[in-house]
């Protein structure tokens, strides 16, 4: 069960939320700035920076030693695993931290590649970020596996599911699938992809880097084997969070140094972690949870007995509220941009083709 963290809050105004982001006070040529590179990373609220600073100023140490700051470091990392277990609907011992998603997918591909060879196949899609392409391409060269890439429909920016289904066969050992496309904003049905992978006995990795800031992930419901996201896309520091099913984290032959812990989840982590970043990433999730009932939308879930909601429930409420609040604003921005940019920007055209997208705009020059 998800940790109970606080009562659901009353509505918070947009101004109150904005005031928590010092970067939004920045001026450029005497004008307030708007940050349009959301797909490249979000700005950071003060609570996240405070958590990073608090770690470095008061608890800074390496892990697993017998002195107070080391114990505190262990506790902060363990607590962050619980926070991300709530964020992804996983267990704390299924949460692995790493420097970024690119490194973690390379790490996984290197580990899985040890047992793959000629005759084995991996399936990805044309909608992937290169971080979910290059690690598998490396296995073509190093291990002789075949990489199959399912096409997207250029008219709609959607995955061609017929092509994807054709490519997933008994030879497929891994399906590595982007839940959200950072270039086009396309949202892909990752549950369906996982099901397809499992129907042929393949492992399923979900790249949720672009998806996780917009939709609350649920690894249990999706039944995926691995899922990865990066906290700097949702108000956190530059740290990645990698989920693996416990039995896989225990059994996959991850490359590691001999003295490193051999128990999950630490056996999938390499070297000293970014402790301050992990503390900040956990604070970013609690920042999201603190927005439950914010933005003028009432909390949707409150615990019956004591009117206290779990962190997961608060997150569900926050994600729903933020989407409801931002959808009309995104639409308005699309319409304004399409008025300025003729011929029509690609995003306007794609949004007409599909209603379920992330708020991702692409402007043609
Ligand atoms: C969909 C997607 N996957 C993977 C990555 C790579 O993540 P990282 O920068 O953490 O390596 C990105 C980064 O933008 C992305 O958008």
Image (tube, rainbow, N blue to C red):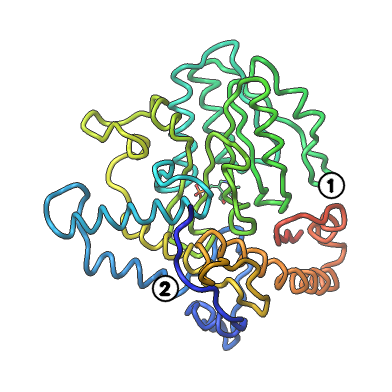
Label 1 packing within 10 angstroms: few (<14), some (14-19), many (20+): some
Q: Is mark 2 within 8 Å of ligand 1?
A: no
Across and down, in percent, residue 311 comes to 50, 62
Residue extending farthest to the left is 66
In the picture, residue 292 is in which quadrant?
A: bottom right
Mark number displayed over residue 47: 2
Q: Would you place residue 101 above or below residue 29 in this image?
A: above
Report helix, strand or loop for mark 1.
Answer: loop
Element class at badge 2:
helix
Which x, y percent locates residue 310? 51, 62
**Residue sitting at the far bottom:** 30
Q: Residue at x 39, y 42 (%)?
A: 93
Say which residue appears at 41% left-offset and 47% top-offset: 92
Residue situated furthest front in the rendering: 305
State the separation of the CA atoms marked 2 and 1. 39 Å
State which tag comes first along the sequence, 2 or 1.
Answer: 2
Disc marking residue 309: none
Left or right side of 138 for 38: right
Q: Residue at the location (67% across, 65% down)?
A: 320
Rendered view: 259 above or below 71: above
Q: Is residue 27 left or right of residue 340?
A: left
Query: Crowdedness of circle 2 by 10 Å Cα count: few (<14), some, many (20+)?
Result: some
Q: Quadrant of the C terminus?
A: bottom right
Q: x, y (%) of residue 170? A: 67, 15
Say which quarter of the image contains residue 203: top right
Mark toward the viewer: 2 or 1: 2
User: Residue at 82% across / 58% down in the picture?
Assistant: 351
User: Which residue bears the numbered disc 1?
Assistant: 156
Q: Count how many numbered circles sit on residues in the image.
A: 2
Q: Is residue 274 left or right of residue 157?
A: left
């Amino acid at each position: 069960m998800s940790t109970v963290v606080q009562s659901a809050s009353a509505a918070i105004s947009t101004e109150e939320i904005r005031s928590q982001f010092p970067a939004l006070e920045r001026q450029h040529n005497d004008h307030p700035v708007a940050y349009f590179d959301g797909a490249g990373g979000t700005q950071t609220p003060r609570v996240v920076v405070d958590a990073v600073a608090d770690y470095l100023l008061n608890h800074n140490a390496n892990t697993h030693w017998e002195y107070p700051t080391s114990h505190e470091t262990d506790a902060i990392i363990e607590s962050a695993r619980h926070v991300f277990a709530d964020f992804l609907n996983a267990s704390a011992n299924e949460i692995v931290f790493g420097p970024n998603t690119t490194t973690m997918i390379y790490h996984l591909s290197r580990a899985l590649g040890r047992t793959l060879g000629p005759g084995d196949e991996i399936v990805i899609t044309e909608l992937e970020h290169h971080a979910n392409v290059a690690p598998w391409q490396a296995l073509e060269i190093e291990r002789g596996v075949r990489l199959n890439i399912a096409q997207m429909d250029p008219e709609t920016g959607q995955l061609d599911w017929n092509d994807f289904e054709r490519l997933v066969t008994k030879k497929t050992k891994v399906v590595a699938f982007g839940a959200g496309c950072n270039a086009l904003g396309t949202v892909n049905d990752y549950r369906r992809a996982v099901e397809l992978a499992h129907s042929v006995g393949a492992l399923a990795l979900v790249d949720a880097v672009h998806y996780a800031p917009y939709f609350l992930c649920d690894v249990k419901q999706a039944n995926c084997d691995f899922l990865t996201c990066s906290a700097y896309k949702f108000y956190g520091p530059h740290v990645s969070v990698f989920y693996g099913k416990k039995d896989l984290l225990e059994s996959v032959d991850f490359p590691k140094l001999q003295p490193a812990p051999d128990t999950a989840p630490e056996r999938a982590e390499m070297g000293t972690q970014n402790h301050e970043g992990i503390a900040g990433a956990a604070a970013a999730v609690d920042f999201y949870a603190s927005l439950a009932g914010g933005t003028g939308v009432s909390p949707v879930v409150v615990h019956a007995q004591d009117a206290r909601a779990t962190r997961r429930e608060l997150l569900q409420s926050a994600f729903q509220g933020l989407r409801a609040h931002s959808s009309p604003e995104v639409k308005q921005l699309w319409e304004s941009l399409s008025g300025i940019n003729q011929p029509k920007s690609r995003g306007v055209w794609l949004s007409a083709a599909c209603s379920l997208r992330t708020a991702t705009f692409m402007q043609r020059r």
